[in-house]
Image (cartoon, rainbow, N blue to C red):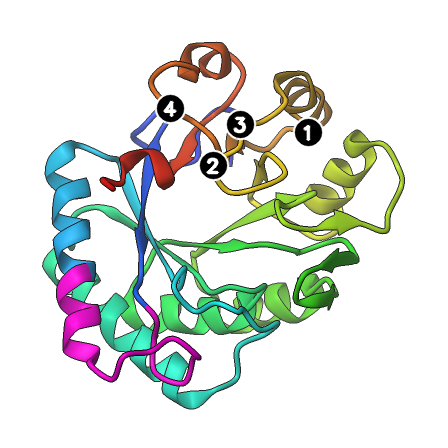
Amino acid sequence: MDNVSLFKDVEKPIIGVVHLKPLPGTPLYKGDLGEVLERALKDAEALYTGGVDGIIVENYGDKPFTIRVKNPLTLTAFTIVAYEVRRKFNDIYLGINILRNSGVEAFAIAYNIGADFIRVNNLCQVLVSPEGVIYPIARELIGLRERLKAQIKVLADINVKHAYSLDRRAIEEIAKDCTERCLADTLIVTGPRTGVEVNVEELLRVKKAVLKPVIVGSGVNIENIDKFWKVADGFIIGSFFKKA
């Protein structure tokens, strides 16, 4: 992969997010998987017709989140919904993100449904979060990808939102290790919370440190995208695309 392109035919892709309603096996699930699927397909349709370059499916409604989702009810339901999104919108880049840091599980789903990429909240750090301590999963995840010989890109957050790193090194050093030692295909830089914009100076430092694409993963909107456009290689936009 070169240093400017996440998707081979799009210079600076815009990735919209399908935020799933609570899934089976999670505290707020309402008992109707059909409703979850219907809403997901409606949101995906809106993003698709709106012209995004990619869509990422995320279990945003599964609060409080758990580290490394293992509940078979949740994982199978997620797979069903993601598969239907893939089947209906089969000509757009599709990604999977399972909160929190269920990158291996997300990769397995992506492999089975034919998705193109996954988002991993913590590939290469030790983080403290509201859900507890989150450990890196690079060896397990990349090992799985190599065994499967799968061409699924790994988009990895560094200093991810809603957490702080126990690694006190400069962000440039973390970024280099995440790409060079932990083999991330793309790095994601976020603000401290959902919907909070990225520190542009921090984004620039990461961009200068690595040869892989660097994308903005939170807080992008119509008023501020100009200041990120020249620096970032792409954008994940969730909250701004939603209607109240």
Q: Which residue type does callout 1 highlight?
A: Val
The residue at which mark 1 appears reads as 210
122 up-or-down from 192: above or below? below
Q: Position of residue 169 (x, y in %)?
A: 89, 38
For this orientation, the residue located farthest to the front is 244
Q: Nearer the viewer, residue 38 or 188?
A: 38
The residue at which mark 4 appears reads as 221
The secondary structure type at the circle numbered 2 is loop
The residue at which mark 3 appears reads as 197
Distance, label 2 to label 4, CA atoms, is 9 Å
The residue at which mark 2 appears reads as 195
Characterize the local packing of mark 2: few (<14), some (14-19) or many (20 or more) Cα atoms within 10 angstroms.
Answer: some
Characterize the local packing of mark 3: few (<14), some (14-19) or many (20 or more) Cα atoms within 10 angstroms.
Answer: many
- Which of the image's four quarters has the C terminus? top left
Image side of residue 233 versus residue 121, left or right:
left
Residue 210 figure quarter: top right
The secondary structure type at the circle numbered 1 is loop
Distance, label 2 to label 3, CA atoms, is 6 Å
Q: Which residue type does callout 4 highlight?
A: Asn
